[in-house]
Image: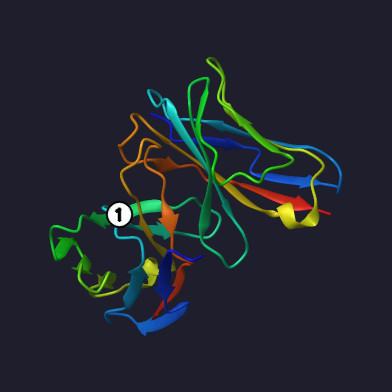
Amino acid sequence: NAGVMQNPRHLVRRRGQEARLRCSPMKGHSHVYWYRQLPEEGLKFMVYLQKENIIDESGMPKERFSAEFPKEGPSILRIQQVVRGDSAAYFCASSPTQYREAFFGQGTRLTVV
Amino acid sequence: QQQVKQSPQSLIVQKGGIPIINCAYENTAFDYFPWYQQFPGKGPALLIAIRPDVSEKKEGRFTISFNKSAKQFSLHIMDSQPGDSATYFCAATQPTGGGNKLTFGTGTQLKVEL
C-alpha cells in the first residue's frame, strides 16, 4: 500500500506564474488536508477536503490560493500569480475517515524566483 | 496567535542522554496531543500521542508527560541515539466537524551526538 504521494517534489516558478501541487492520498482514504511549512516554522493548516467538497478552508489565504479534490484523480492545490512569500514546503496528509490519524506525504518544495 | 508554544528551538545531547521537549497550549478545547518526527526532506511522521485523561504515555523509548491543569505536555526520549536526530513537532487537535485539523508547535531540532 503506497503512502501519500505528492508531486512534484520540487517546483520552481517565476513570480506571477501559477503553481499546481498534486496529492494522491493513500488507497481507501477520502479525506485530505493541506499544510504549509515556512522555513524555520511549524506546519500551518490550510484546507481540509473530502471527495468533491471543501470542508474547512479557514487557513487558506483569501486570494490566489484554491484547492480541489475531484471524484477521480488527485487533490490539487493551486497558487495563482505566485510571489516570493509563497516559497515554502507544502504537505498533504490523508486519512480514511474524519477523525482517524492522517498520514503525511513527503511534500512539495516550492521556490519562487 | 501561536496556540501551541514549543521549546527549546534546538537541542544537542550526547548519545544515551534524555532530551526533553516542552509544549504549552492555550485552547482548552484541545483534546488530542500528538508528537511528530520529521527528517530532512521528508514529511512528518506520527511518533506518539496522548489524550488529556491520562498523565503519561510510553511507547518504546518515547514518553509523553501531560499536565492538564498547567496546559503543558512534554516529550522525553530515553537512551537517545544518533538516529533520533530530527525535528520534533508537538501538535494539538480539537473536536470539530472539520476533521482532524492539527495545530503545530514551531518545532525542535534535536541532534544526538556520539
Q: Residue at x 68, y 43 (%)?
A: A62
For the residue pair B113 and A31, the one nearer the viewer reads as: A31
Please determine whether, in this image, residue A48 is positioned above or below residue A35: above
Q: Residue at x 51, y 61 (%)?
A: A42
For the residue pair A109 and B82, the one nearer the viewer reads as: A109
Residue A21 on image: x %, y %: 65, 36
Q: Residue at x 58, y 68 (%)?
A: A40
Residue A54 on image: x %, y %: 52, 29
Side of B78 where B105 appears, left or right: right
Residue A101 on image: x %, y %: 32, 41
Q: Can residue B20 be seen here?
A: yes
Residue A22 on image: x %, y %: 62, 33
Residue with the mark numbered 1: B29
In which quadrant is the C terminus of chain A drawn? Answer: bottom right
In which quadrant is the N terminus of chain A drawn? Answer: top left
Please determine whether, in this image, residue A25 is positioned above or below residue B37: above
Q: Can residue A77 be seen here?
A: no
